[in-house]
Amino acid sequence: MKNLSNLSCKIIYCLLISTPISSQEPFLEIRPYAPPSFQQYPITEQVDHHYPYAEDGSLLRFDGLLFTDNIIYPNCVFGLSCYDGHGGIDYHMPYNNPIIAPANGYVLWASFSEPADPCPGGITPNGDQGTIIISHGDGYYTVYLHMNPPLGVSVGENVETGDTLGYNGNTGCAVNAHLHFEVRKGSWTFDINEPHVVDPFGWWDTIPDPIEEIRGNRSEWLWVSNSLVDDGDNGFQRFAGPDWNYLSSGYNNDCWITPVKYSIEESRHYAIWVPYLQDSGEYNIEVFTPEGVNASTGAIYEISVKNEDGTSTKTNVIVNQNSSPGGFTTIATLELPAGSKSSVILRDVVQQSSSGNNVVFDAIRFTSNTSTSVLDKRSTNILADSEDVFSYPNPFNPTTTVVYRVQKQSDVEIIIYNSIGAIIKSYLVPNQQPGLHNMKWGGYNNDGSKVNSGIYFFIIKTQTRKMSGKTIFIK
């Protein structure tokens, strides 16, 4: 990050807003915190879509569930119904955990100021509240509350993805240490009557989003993702619950399980997967389940596909999670739009006739069945019969797409090296079908940190051959 003079700050800010981020394209590259060893902190409190900042007796979640009981602190159920009138999402994490920029931006606000009066639920404020606000272009702003002193940035600084902004705490209207993370669109200012709040996890119900009715701002999925989403990736989010259990098995040797429940009233655990699909078309939706976890035979996967008006069409699929342990199983084949316009939600609630003690939350893969997709046409024109692999754009920033050809069905290993031969990032795709495939890389290593500018080499191994290429990352 760089501390600039007022004049140069204004110049950089003008450049930032002159190269906007499309409102339809995800731009948040990482979660806004230093990750734990198990990859993600769960979300404990949600954006209230009905309505942010207004305690009106109801809480409407991004998945369409409405709560009217126990929605005011301290009686609300953390991770389920906390709390009416909440304009952001809360990540509970250890005190003084580093808070980091999830995308490039410009610091508009960084200070300690008086907290809300009164605080929600009548709690006693814990001194002045540490607040940071960053502009990201195209009218998007991220807000960070309850920060500890001292703040790590100042007004007028430019920040890059992964820069440390400061450390989380419990300043202002907070009892426990956590990060209140908020996204606003159209203005960075706080407006209690007509808020600018949007939900970075989108809106996935069959009815219109009440947030959009306030200022016309639509809640879109804003996290950069891929067509294969593992349970620690950017396209995955787990939500708080009392009985999550992390296992060192499954795809990439990790997964989450929870005890089964038989009614939505008992449910306390759920997660969402949202891919980024290069092209619209027919896709197989495939789920991975590990071996030896006594999984449910009646898990319910909720697939939502976004319509043009911002509502979703939903399909529920009953899945026996024991049907193909140790591999991927196709649970549905659907026409899906390009971009981050489809999602899968899985809860701990299972079919009444289900057996097995656990619901498994692991990788989900979206595999195109459309041979005439835009990517395939473009790839065929560039990838000659004698070639096996290429990447575009090259040089790249922020992402590049590696396109490669598989001759025979095979497990595929993709490894990215830096110029001195150290492994930067690795992927494993089991049982990939013959044909053209692609993998997006956003310039991050296996620890989730952004790599430096430079030359990077990728090697793609199948059971019968090895392919290689190189790409250049520039900042």
Image (cartoon, helix red, strand yellow):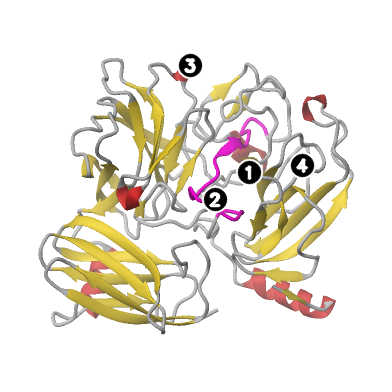
Residue highlighted by disc 4: 170
Could you tell whether 447 is left or right of 135 in the image?
left
Give the mark toward the camera: 4 or 3. Answer: 4
Identify the mark nearer the N-term, 1 or 3. Answer: 1
Q: Is residue 161 above or below residue 52?
A: below
Residue at image x 19%, y 75%? 466
Sort mark 1 into few (<14), some (14-19) or many (20+) by Cα contacts within 10 Å. Answer: many
- Helix, strand or loop at disc 4? loop
Identify the mark nearer the N-term, 4 or 3. Answer: 4
Residue type (three-letter) at the residue carrying disc 1: Met
Give the mark toward the camera: 3 or 2. Answer: 2
Identify the mark nearer the N-term, 2 or 4. Answer: 2
Contact between labelled residues 2 and 1, with CB atoms less than 8 Å apart? yes
Label 3 – label 2 distance at C-alpha: 30 Å
Identify the mark nearer the N-term, 1 or 4. Answer: 1
Identify the disc placed on residue 327.
none
Seen from the viewer's position, the closer of residues 68 and 334 is 68
Residue 336 visible in the snapshot: no
Identify the mark nearer the N-term, 1 or 2. Answer: 2
Residue highlighted by disc 3: 265
Residue highlighted by disc 2: 36
User: Residue 8, percent across and down?
Assistant: 78, 80
- In the image, the segment drawn in magenta is 31-51
Look at the image and say whether residue 185 sits in the magenta stretch.
no
Could you tell whether 113 is left or right of 394 in the image?
right
Residue at image x 68%, y 39%? 87
Label 4 – label 3 distance at C-alpha: 31 Å
